[in-house]
Image: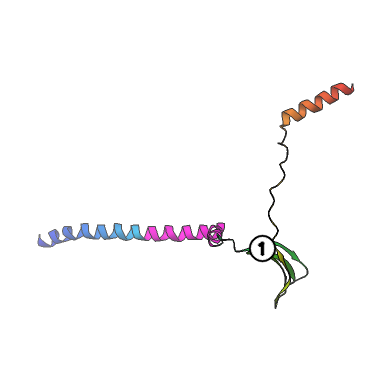
Amino acid sequence: MNAASSLNASLPQESVLMTVGGTLALIVLLMVALAWVARRSGFARRLNDASGAINVVASKSLGARERLILVDVGEQRLILGVTATQITCLATQAKPEMHEPESQPAPVSFGAMLDTLLKKHRQSR
């Protein structure tokens, strides 16, 4: 009966080790999955570019491997010519100030638009 009592005494320790090991594995797996989702969604890139020191404003393809790129760097705007082998700064100018967009009239609801059209149609009769 000595062997049976030692077998019963070792079971709870193994059970605790299995639970802790399984929990740690689950946490590591969850962290890897969250990192993958953050990378795929672009969330990690947005966190890295929080300062906004360099911002690509526009890009235009000129050929198979040639591009014209408009980049804001600090207070300057650069026009870059990019090929497969080099990048050339074509022009430098001051970064234009951002103006607030002009306020546009509020969109008209469908019901109001339908009423207006019906009134015009009735008047033309």
Q: Residue at x 73, y 33 (%)?
A: 108
Task: Give coordinates of residue 38: x percent, y percent.
Answer: 51, 58
- Which image quadrant for residue 51? bottom right
Quadrant that contains the N terminus = bottom left
Q: Residue at x 32, y 61 (%)?
A: 21
Q: Which amino acid, mark 1?
A: Val
- Residue labelled with disc 1: 56
Start-end of magenta stretch: 25-48
Above-or-below relation of 12 to 120? below
Which colour style is shown? Answer: rainbow
Task: Give coordinates of residue 55: x percent, y percent.
Answer: 64, 62
Above-or-below relation of 15 to 91? above
As drawn, the residue found furthest toward the right would be: 125
Main secondary-structure element of the magenta-colored stretch: helix
Q: Identify which residue, 6 or 90, lies in the foreground.
A: 90
Quadrant that contains the C terminus = top right
Q: Is residue 26 magenta?
A: yes
Task: Give coordinates of residue 56: x percent, y percent.
Answer: 66, 63
